Amino acid sequence: MAALDTWLRLIKPITPQFVGVVSINEDDYLHIFGRKSPLDPQTLKTLIQAIAQGDPVVIGVDIDTSDTEWQNIAPDLVALSGERTALVWEQEAIGEEEPLTPLKILGGAEITPESISGIAGLFQDWDGVVRRYQRHFRATGVKEGQVEMVDSFPWAIVKAFYQKSPSRLP
């Protein structure tokens, strides 16, 4: 690990060409969302709609949407995911080791087509540093005792990008 850490410190960081990050800082949390957790789905929907107007290939939403209040606007959010733009939702999961127990996205709303999601999980090494991520996680399935492979959030974004814009990849 020491060699990997040294090498990572010495290489020049890669500047992302196709990635833009919209983050919610403390000031936004206070003034836009009124310090309310979970975040107000209607306000977040407005933000996602504004981002979608820029015509991105993929919008990855790393916000916990497991609360049932998301069910009311889930159809509107799924409608944003169209022919040119894919919406990928972060999926919360319970557990410190696999198999994880995934929580429902968008409050568990039953919507068609099914939304794209991935489990956000970065596991720390023994020294507290995250050096890698997984493409998939073992997770408990719908039926008791069933285990299935579920995409990680970053991998779900990569797959959605490739589906919507394969010509942009080398």
Image (cartoon, rainbow, N blue to C red):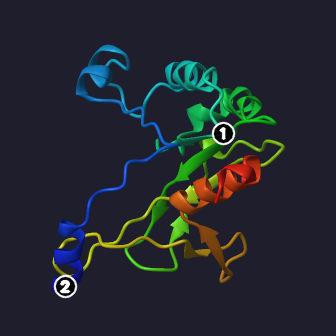
For residue 122, which quarter of the picture? bottom left
Give the amino acid type for the residue marked by disc 2 in the picture.
Answer: Ala
Residue 1 visible somewhere in the drawing: no
Q: Secondary structure at mark 2?
A: helix
Q: Residue furthest top?
A: 31
Image location of residue 159, percent across then percent down: 66, 59
- Report the Cα–Cα distance between label 1 and label 2: 36 Å
* Above/below status of 13 relative to 96: above
Crowd around label 1: few <14 · some 14–19 · many ≥20 (10 Å) = many
Counting residues from the start of the chain, the first of labels 1 and 2 encountered is 2
Q: Residue at x 74, y 53 (%)?
A: 166
For residue 24, which quarter of the picture? top left
* Above/below status of 56 relative to 119: above
Which residue, given by chain and number where applicable, does mark 1 sit on?
A: 57
* 12 sits to left or right of 17: left
* 5 sits to left or right of 123: left
Which residue, given by chain and number where applicable, does mark 2 sit on?
A: 3
Q: Residue at x 61, y 52 (%)?
A: 104
